[in-house]
Amino acid sequence: MHGCHIVRKRRLAILLVGAAFFWLTAAAATTQDLFSLRQNAPMPERSMPDLRRLPPSKKREEDYLNKPYSGSVNFPRDLSPLAKKIYDAVLKAARKRPKLSTVHVDDIATAGEVTEVAVSLTSGPKDKVCQDIYANTILRAKEEVLIQTYFYAPKKKHGSESSPETKPIRVILTVDSQSLIVYGSNLNKNAFYMSTTWNELPPSAYFDMSRLKGLDVRIFLFHNYPLGSIHSKNIIVDGQWSCIGSKNLDNEGTQELGIQMYGPVSRVMRRDFFRLLKGYKVPEVELRTPEPVKEMGMAPMIVVGKAAQRGIPGFNSFDSPQNVAWKTVFEKAEKKVFILTPNFNVPEFFKAAIDMVKRGKAFTLVVSRKMLNFGQHLSKAAGSKGTNHEVANQFYDYIDAHPEVAERVKVLYFSPKDEVVEDRNVTEEERMRKKKAENSSHVKLMIADGKLLIVGSGNMDQQSAYYSQEFNLVIDDGVVTENVRRALKEEMRKEDVSFKPTNVRKGN
């Protein structure tokens, strides 16, 4: 027994040292000046409804533990059978452990209109996620822009001016403290000190103060040490418009997904944003902009987030709304499940996938072979199943032992085609971008039966499942799901990208 305790302590020490090493040595990146685009693009318009949805109850979460199921009161229409099962399971989990949910239980059921979907493998000016989703959303701001991002990595300080005819636009940016450690040195030589001692940064840390006329900017740092990152990537504008997806505000060349939305879901995301700021006593300012109402044409949405946890590796709770939603899809999908995620190594999800295949359902997993291999290898000390290569081998081990399931399991790698990287007609810049992006997709999505979509910031790895704060949505709409699938397929066709069979065995 004494020897076992020593081994566990050594594994924990290796994990923490490795995590610290990763934080201090990750490569720097750059980001686009999204705010400066306000001066160069037309303002999108949308007619605003007059009605307002009633605000959620002010009762504490614990008051809902004994509250009976009230039906889909905030949904625009009835849920599909699978979405109903997800909602029931998530609601039960949130009532049992309210501190693991990022939103109030009244806000788990919501709705929204998906107005734009973009997938991009290109960084810089041609990045469709930044241009069509992030910038397009920010351009709509009349009084407030709220941004949650894991990394905010400008190459240089930047800024923008709002119109002198309007009142100052309130801009609040929340960033994980880790990003300042990794990326802050190019902005301030005291970045490490600031990240470990400051809760709020001055706007000058990221912005050119001479260009902030008409913008009221505040920047907050978050991190629940040792591993509790703030990992969501959300933008909320005026409580009406919002976007979620996989892309941080950086300039990385990995595959990314962004979704723009309008409707009540934006107010839910705004309340989630200010709930995170509650510890800093930042009030949720009442907006002049009317609150969007639920409309029949909107898609039913279920908020399945996860709060950051401080716990020691191996001792955090699994039953967050995020994890419960994913697991319910594995258990209740009628025909098939498709997953695209940077990493997949959580034992509970691996077992759920195997059990699903045993029941005769089809399972397709697409991962990025070399995505954060060092960190994923370290996570085995906390009980994960290791790197994507190791997980792929474990799936194939199961297939070898149970050949009858071989036709129902596909484990694929995301990768540009080799011949494109080596094509001499491709510019050096394009060749380097493709080499950097090779085997790297940062998209996080789950599609069930081709009709239901779960999308957001959560990876299916140990970090997202047990430690990080995440924000995801279940979108119960077949049209939206198909639009996301088509956008993904079309961008991959343009960029000469394919999902390649892993065909791995141990030692390969």
Image (cartoon, grey):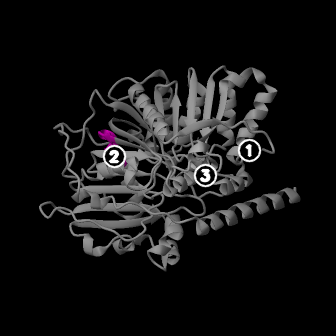
Front residue of 435 and 221: 435
User: Relative to 488, is 406 above or below?
Assistant: above
Of marks 3 and 1, which one's residue comes earlier in the chain?
A: 1
Range of magenta residues: 261-269
> The residue tagged with tag 1: helix, strand or loop?
helix
SS at mark 2 in the image: helix
In this picture, residue 344 sits left or right of residue 230:
right
Crowding near the residue tagged with mark 2, few <14, some 14–19, many ≥20 C-alpha atoms within 10 Å: some
Q: At which x and y percent is residue 248?
A: 45, 55
Q: Is residue 333 above or below residue 454?
A: above
Image position of 239 with respect to 182: above or below: above
Q: Is residue 119 left or right of residue 229?
A: left
Q: Nearer the viewer, residue 391 or 382?
A: 391
Kindly identify the residue that appears in the image at 37 percent across and 56 percent down.
147
Label 2, label 1: how far apart the Cα atoms are: 37 Å
Q: Which mark is residue 463?
A: 3
Whole-number angstrom distance, CA of label 2 to CA of label 3: 29 Å
| Residue 390: numbered disc | 1
Q: Is residue 330 left or right of residue 110?
A: right
